[in-house]
Amino acid sequence: MKAKTMFYCTECGNELPKWAGQCPACKAWNTIVEQPAETKRKSSAAVATAGERRGSIKPRLMDEVETTRELRFQTGMNELDRVLGGGAVQGSLVLVGGAPGIGKSTLMLQICQNLCRFAKVLYVSGEESERQIKLRAERLGVRGQELYLLAETNLDDVVEAVTALQPDVLIVDSIQTMYNGELSAAPGSIGQVKDCTMALMNLAKGRGVTVFVIGHVNKEGSIAGPKVLEHMVDCVLYFEGEQQNSYRILRAAKNRFGATNEIGVFEMGDAGLTEVPNPSEMLLAGRPQDTPGTCVTCVMEGVRPVLAEVQALLAPTSFNVPRRTCNGFDFNRANLLLAVLEKRGGLMVSSCDAYINVIGGLNLDEPAADLAMVVALASSFRDRPVPGDLAAIGEVGLTGELRSVNALGQRLSEVHRLGFTKCLVPQRTGAKLEVPDGLQLIKVRNIREALAFL
């Protein structure tokens, strides 16, 4: 007799009675998978809060709910605390994802150094033995009397250990190695990942344990498993960086207790991760002088202004259709700026191959970098360098006009602090704009005036 199976979408978790090419809920193609239907059972999520929810299920008026502020505590790393919104929240569930070898386990083990001073920490690893974790901790210089290690992949054993030890912080490395013995699916499957995450979420909410969960990523760079996994947790952090580059960027994709546009910068060394408190200076290190095709702009990452170097290279094309390559800059936005530069700026860039790069692994997704990109493209086309003490900030419209951007005062302060003496900005900058002493503002109305000045 054939076992009963069920179908569901790996992107949104929608269940279907039969297989289909496209999910009717999220409209994604080729995301429907088949899995044996589970028999009626007592899930690990229910086991995690057994006895605590019994008799407490009762609706409450919103006016009767206490609105006390969340309890935050510092992790010992200012860059991580900034991304979390000022520190970790007690009883929250944080998901940390990243490519293999990027430093996820190193980051989690390093914060144990400070957490063990005032909290009891349980580090659960399904990929390393307890001896391997201790050797890595000694290499990183991590010591803590209240740090407990557990090498286990069975979720029931992990829940039992949490119940007996009652830690304040739980770190799970990684969620793809955990499994529930009552499920017939293999560890790492979508059903196992969903059930294990649900159990950890009930631990966090029911017992007030702060849970950090490490997750693997797939080929597309998103966290492996169903998309509903990211909806279940309170905070989703992505650890980004190139294997050949020592710098790492921690970015929040979701945060119920803070902003989602903050970043933290780390440097990977032999002794682990080191915080980079001044990312602008790091991103501009080694910048070439008197070289065409480069310009500096200032973007806002949350409340932090960050200076970034934009590079462009234009070369005569040998194809019927010119090539366009972008790294760290939106491809469609680059094509738009190239069209505006030719139509409104008078430069015949349609006959050139365009190669665009942002130094340091940053992804510039705000319009404030438009003017710097146009200046870099024009500099490469005319083979004339941009002054080394000049930065450009502004949004470019389809008619070639320049529009002001938000937080211009903070951007100008960061530009002046890094030693720049001139800044190219739009004509309209706002009524109350404090310009730092020693910084010359060059106000232009459109890209023609900007190129004429340069």
Image (cartoon, grey):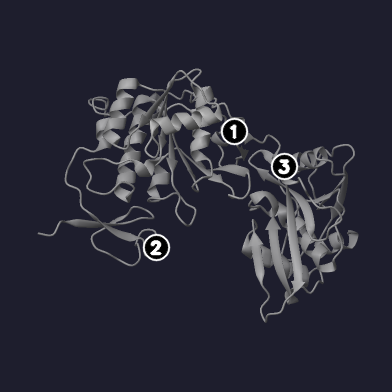
Q: Which mark is residue 282?
A: 3
Does 326 appear above or below 359?
below
User: Which residue lies most toward the bottom here?
Assistant: 320
Q: From the viewer's perspective, tell me whether residue 382 is left or right of residue 135.
A: right
- 112 vs 294, nearest the viewer: 112
- 220 vs 47, nearest the viewer: 220
Res 324 quadrant in image: bottom right
Query: Which residue is label 1 attached to?
Result: 271
Among numbered discs 2 and 3, the one appearing first in the sequence: 2
Q: What's the amino acid at mark 2?
A: Lys
Viewport quadrant of the N terminus: bottom left
- 422 vs 256, nearest the viewer: 422
- Residue at x 13%, y 59% (from the top left corner): 2
- Residue at x 48%, y 37% (from the top left corner): 105
Q: Can residue 88 be seen in this view?
A: no
Query: Which residue is label 2 attached to?
Result: 27
Among numbered discs 2 and 1, the one appearing first in the sequence: 2
Structural crowding at the residue carrying mark 2, measured as other residues with C-alpha within 10 Å and reported as few (<14), some (14–19) or many (≥20): few
Q: Position of residue 226 (x, y in %)?
A: 37, 51
Q: What's the amino acid at mark 1?
A: Ala
Asked if marks 2 and 1 touch (Cβ < 8 Å), the reply is no
